[in-house]
Every structure is written in structure tokens, then in C-alpha cells.
Amino acid sequence: RQRFMGKLRENLVDSRPVFSPLSSLPMFEPRVKNPVALRIGQSAINLPSGHNLILEQLEHVATTIKKLV
């Protein structure tokens, strides 16, 4: 994930790690087990999103991801 985020940054695409799920907090640990959510929280990234992105920005993000993958 960090290496991929670094490559995105080199191509002027902002990203950040996905937050860990709430079920990973100590207060929930004895009651809730969410292995899928934990795996996603450890590997997923957030990409630019929002209502104010213009088409060219979205195309740049998509093109960059296609190139890197």
C-alpha cells in the first residue's frame, strides 16, 4: 500500500490509507471480530473523491491507476 501510494504521489494523485475499522479499537475487541474489515483497513487506500472534482482530474486519477496496475 505504501509503495503504491508513493507511486500515486509521484504522479500527482493524492491518496491516504483507509481508517482502521472501529471494531479494531480495544473497547470492542472482546466482543466483535471482523476479519474482512480488518484486512480492508490494512490494505485499502482512499482516492480523490468529491463533488468538486472536475472530469480532467477524474481522468488523471483513472489513467494513473491503470498505468500503475
Image (cartoon, rainbow, N blue to C red):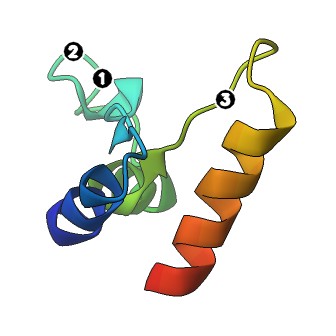
Quick one: label 2, few (<14), some, or many (20+) residues within 10 Å?
few
Can residue 37 be seen here?
yes
Give coordinates of residue 62: x percent, y percent: 68, 62
The three-letter amino acid code for the residue at tag 3 is Ser
- Residue at image position (82%, 14%) is 51
Number of the front mark, 1 or 3: 3
Location of mark 2 (residue):
27
Image spot of residue 46 (x, y percent):
48, 40
Which residue, given by chain and number where applicable, does mark 3 sit on? 49
Query: Which residue is located at x 49 percent, y 61 percent?
Result: 36
Residue under the point 17% across and 70% down: 3
Q: Where in the figure is residue 40, as x and y percent of width and height? A: 44, 57
Q: Looking at the image, do the residues carrying marks 3 and 2 touch, with CB atoms under 8 Å apart? A: no
Q: Quadrant of the N terminus?
A: bottom left
- Looking at the rendered structure, the kind of residue marked 1 is Phe
What's the distance in space between the residues labelled 3 and 2, CA to CA?
A: 31 Å
Secondary structure under the numbered disc 1 in the rendered image: loop
Q: In this view, does 40 lie to the left or right of 55?
A: left
Left or right relative to 24: residue 62: right
In screen coordinates, is 62 left or right of 67? Answer: right
Task: For residue 17, say whether it is visible.
Answer: no
Gap between marks 1 and 3 measured at Cα: 30 Å
Q: Disc 1 designates what residue? A: 28
Q: What element carries label 3?
A: loop
Determine contact: label 2, label 1, CB under 8 Å: yes
Dot placed on the residue nearer the N-terminal end, 3 or 2: 2
In the rendered structure, which amino acid carries the disc numbered 2? Answer: Met
Q: Are marks 1 and 3 in contact (CB under 8 Å)?
A: no
